[in-house]
Amino acid sequence: MGFIPVRDLPAARDWYGGVLGLHVVEETPFAVVIDAAATQLRLTPVPDLVPRPFTIAGWRVPDIRATVRALTDAGVAFTRYDGVDQDDLGIWTTPGGDQIAWFADPDGNTLSLTTFASG
């Protein structure tokens, strides 16, 4: 199980469940549990959230270009980093051929998508 800190639990539930399309497993005043494939994510409200300057959660996807396009159509903005050679969709290809794209949730938490070259 992974934990993601959020400021507004209902808004986070709507974004992770609606925009990202992840299934809500459980909802209490203390957390929203999301089924993220083989891992559960627990969205937990925190009073003084300071987003970290690194990726806190990521997903392996079979077709990163299609996934980035679908999320962009749903209103997700992909992050561009100075000095990182990203393509027109914001995808960076590593020297080994893996492809990665980053985006933020409404609280500023950095999330990522990866398609591995090895499949």
Image (cartoon, rainbow, N blue to C red):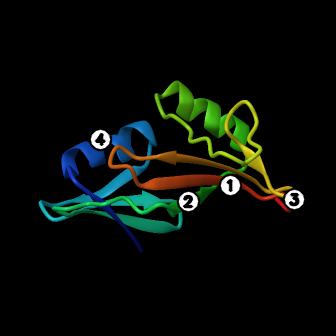
Q: Amino acid at mark 1?
A: Thr
Q: Image quadrant for the N terminus?
A: bottom left
Q: Residue at x 37, y 38 (%)?
A: 18
In the image, residue 22 lies at what x, y percent? Answer: 43, 49
Q: Residue at x 31, y 60 (%)?
A: 50
User: Do tag 4 and tag 1 residues touch (Cβ < 8 Å)?
Assistant: no
Q: Examine the rendered structure and indicate whether residue 83 appears above or below residue 76.
A: below
User: Mark 2 = which residue?
Assistant: 58
User: Do tag 4 and tag 2 residues touch (Cβ < 8 Å)?
Assistant: no
Foreground residue among 59 and 79: 79
In the image, residue 29 lies at what x, y percent? Answer: 12, 60
Helix, strand or loop at mark 2: strand
User: Mark 4 = which residue?
Assistant: 14
Foreground residue among 39 and 87: 87
As drawn, the label of residue 114 is 1
In the image, residue 114 lies at what x, y percent? Answer: 68, 55
Helix, strand or loop at mark 3: loop
Q: Earlier in the sequence, mark 4 or mark 1?
A: 4
Separation (CA) of disc 3 from disc 2: 19 Å
**In this rendering, the label closer to the viewer, 3 or 2:** 3
Question: In the rendered view, does 52 fall on the left or right side of 100?
Answer: left
As drawn, the label of residue 95 is 3
